Amino acid sequence: MREFSPPVGEELAIDADHEPELSDADILDAMQQLPGYIDIGTEDFRLIYHLAWRHAVERLRRRQAGRDDAA
């Protein structure tokens, strides 16, 4: 998977306080689009999503801090 990078000269806004909320319908739709079968419920998926969101926010903050240090 390719990682998103904002255009040169533009900063990436990180709104860590407003994690997008996923409905059961969002989760079930996404799971139906996957090939094969995943034995996981919507609550477990939400937990994985939340943990992945936190990880991504920290990664993007570290990247942004590195750019700020270089300026």
Image: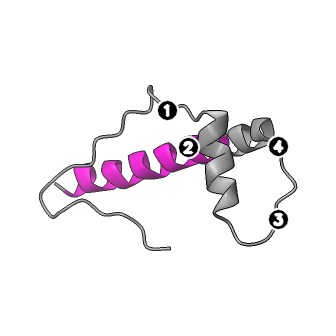
Residue at (62%, 50%) from the top-left corner?
Answer: 29
Residue at (51%, 49%) from the top-left corner?
Answer: 56
What residue does disc 2 label?
53
What residue does disc 4 label?
41
Pointers 1 and 2 in contact (C-beta within 8 Å): yes
Q: Quadrant of residue 4?
A: bottom left
- Label 1 to label 2, Cα distance in Å? 7 Å
| Residue 37 image label | 3
Q: Identify the mark nearer the N-term, 2 or 4.
A: 4
Q: Nearer the viewer, mark 1 or mark 4?
A: 4
The vertical placement of 55 against 22, above or below, is below
Q: Quadrant of residue 44?
A: top right
| Residue 19 image label | 1
> Is 52 or 26 nearer to us in this picture?
26
Which amino acid, mark 1? Glu
Q: Identify the mark nearer the N-term, 3 or 2.
A: 3
Which amino acid, mark 4? Gly
The vertical placement of 66 against 15, above or below, is below
Q: Which residues are magenta?
A: 51-70
Q: Identify the mark nearer the N-term, 1 or 3.
A: 1
Which residue is the extreme one toward the top? 17
